[in-house]
Image: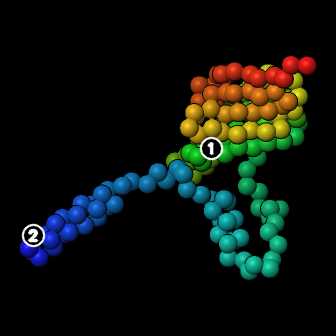
């Protein structure tokens, strides 16, 4: 292979890479906007010896639980999260940015089959399932809104 062939192949690879990068469209709904963005821009610009305070700006409230939330799990898509609480309820939430820069939040699914407070939630990425615990282990599919199985310790 001559030197010109090598440069030519390299130029072609660079051209393909640059074209692919330019054509990728970013999903803007996944980026921080409005209060969230201004809040974190403010906090990132602060010196290290200042105290981080979440009381300065109202970020977002979610209505659904009737008692304290004990566990929270944010999924990798960053627009879905699961909450479990003392009300013996699990909620799967969807957060979406709207075209007018507002945020739409809704509970997509709830599960009330707990006997005690939900104190742990973990998302099993490889299986796309959530495991929750109230003393028993409940395995759920948060995308289909289905219970997969429940494991209880026999006495």
Q: Quadrant of residue 154?
A: top right
SS for dot 1: loop
Q: Quadrant of residue 8?
A: bottom left
**For the N terminus, which image quadrant?**
bottom left
47, above or below 143, in the image: below
Per the rendering, the mark at residue 75 is 1
Per the rendering, the mark at residue 96 is none
Q: Position of residue 132 (x, y in %)?
A: 75, 33
Q: Position of residue 78 (x, y in %)?
A: 60, 48
Q: Quadrant of residue 23?
A: bottom left
32, above or below 61, in the image: below
The answer to whether one can see residue 64 in this image is no
**For the C terminus, which image quadrant?**
top right
Per the rendering, the mark at residue 1 is 2
Q: Position of residue 7 (x, y in %)?
A: 15, 73
Residue occupying image coordinates x 84% and y 41%: 70
Residue sitting nearer the eye, 24 or 7 = 7
134, above or below 23, in the image: above
């Amino acid at each position: 292979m001559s030197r010109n062939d090598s440069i030519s192949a390299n130029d072609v690879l660079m051209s393909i890479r640059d074209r692919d990068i330019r054509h990728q469209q970013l999903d803007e709904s996944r980026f921080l906007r409005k209060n969230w963005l201004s809040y974190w821009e403010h906090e990132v610009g602060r010196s290290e010896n200042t105290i981080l305070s979440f009381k300065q700006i109202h970020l977002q409230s979610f209505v659904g639980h009737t008692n304290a939330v004990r566990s929270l799990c944010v999924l990798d898509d960053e627009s879905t999260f699961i909450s479990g609480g003392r009300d013996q309820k699990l909620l799967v939430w969807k957060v979406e940015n709207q075209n007018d820069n507002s945020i739409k939040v809704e509970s997509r699914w709830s599960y009330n089959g707990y006997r005690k407070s939900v104190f742990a939630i973990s998302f099993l990425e490889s299986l796309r399932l959530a495991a929750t615990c109230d003393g028993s282990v409940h395995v759920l599919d948060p995308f289909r809104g289905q219970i997969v199985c429940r494991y209880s310790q026999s006495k």
